Amino acid sequence: MNQKLYYSDAYQQSFTAQIIKQDYDSEGNLYVTLTETTFYPTGGGQPHDTGTLNDISVINVEEVNDEIRHFISSELHTKEVIGKINWQRRFDHMQQHTAQHILSAAFWDHFNIPTIAFHLGKETITIDLDTPELTLETANTALQIANQIVFENHPIHIRWMNLEEARQLPLRKEPTITEDIRVVIIENYDYNGCGGTHPKYTGEVGPIHIIGWERNKGGIRLSFVAGWRALKLMGHHQQIIKDISRQLNSGADDIPNKVTHLLASHKENEKTLQAMNEKLLFVEVNELLQQSKKVAAGTLIAKVFTNRSMQEIAKLSAIITEQNENSITYFVTENEEKLQCILACGKAVTANMNTILKNALPTIEGKGGGNQKSARGGGKAVITGEEFSALLIHLSQEQFEMKYKG
């Protein structure tokens, strides 16, 4: 353990060491091992430190085969190096990791909810709680207890012990090793086997803030932040509230009522707009009916639209074919580099819309389908909408002629 300076002093930010080995791993990544180091390697849910060795960037740190590998951006050409860790990153990890200990202990001690997994991400931290449900009251109470421990500024001790000694303590989890067990003790509160870095007092963790939670694999995954991350998030949220207050011309306390009123108004406006759109569709239907042509199979209405949604042209088609049992609609819409279409007919028409569509789609490398009365599909705009519409008409004529001859 002597080479792991982060265990003897988590606050040490620089050190001098000798290079033991400089090599490439199996994936071609350059790394060095040192006589000692304050760089923490990824492990136990905590990410690695970053920093420099003789001003060369350390981009990753891993413990492989009992050696700590410092992955660097370029070769070192000296035997001795001066290492400096990114202290802001290290202290952030110390805050978040210790906050996890504190919050997990609150859930376990007061609600008998154990933590079964922990992940320290770049933006948030998550713990997986072994419970199918989590109420707002339980989460808020656990959070209040956790922050109380922070404010009480409990000392944090690190002790190395064997299995027999460890079993004398109320550890959260049975150790998996028998010697060199590292126990993080939050005085009068928590005892936890852990290999991460931690501050000397809980007060250094700063405020803990729960962001939210969701169901995950039968349990609950809870997201939170602590320390400087919590302050940054709170400041961000405060700015959002200020911006919304300014836009709504109201105080922060009035935002919920204002939003409720706006949503209600929006729903009413949507209903009004939908009703107006329905009226416009019927106007458009009348205009389309005036363009209809008599064909052998019935009354055909063929139309090519530009940047029109399939939902809208399907409504037009449905209105026409439901009101006119002899009608046939071939509607094609050109949307950027795509052609889409819907073919439909009234109940008195004997032509098969699905067959006509299936015969036309290969021309545009398309896909689609339906039934005898209605079919839709789309493909690439390798021909114009007008050309594709003409193809549909031609195919329908062929189908009717074949049926007639039959």
Image (cartoon, grey):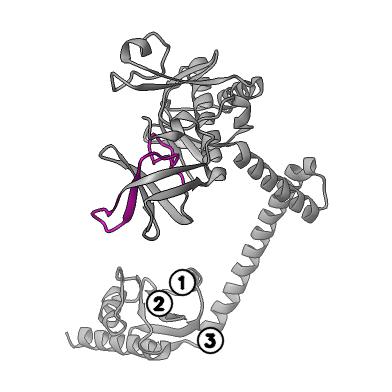
Which one is in front, 237 or 63? Answer: 63
The answer to whether the residue labelled 3 contacts the one labelled 2, judged by CB atoms less than 8 Å apart, is no
**Disc 3 or 2, which lies upstream in sequence?**
3
- The residue to which callout 1 is attached is 310
Can you say whether 34 is above or below 72 in the image?
above
From the viewer's perspective, is 255 left or right of 229?
Answer: right
- Which stretch is magenta? 21-50
Mark 1 residue element: helix
- The residue to which callout 3 is attached is 290
- The residue to which callout 2 is attached is 340
Can you say whether 398 is above or below 42 in the image?
below
The answer to whether the residue labelled 2 contacts the one labelled 1, judged by CB atoms less than 8 Å apart, is yes
Q: Amino acid at mark 3?
A: Gln
Mark 3 residue element: loop
Q: Amino acid at mark 1?
A: Met
Toward the front, the furthest residue is 79
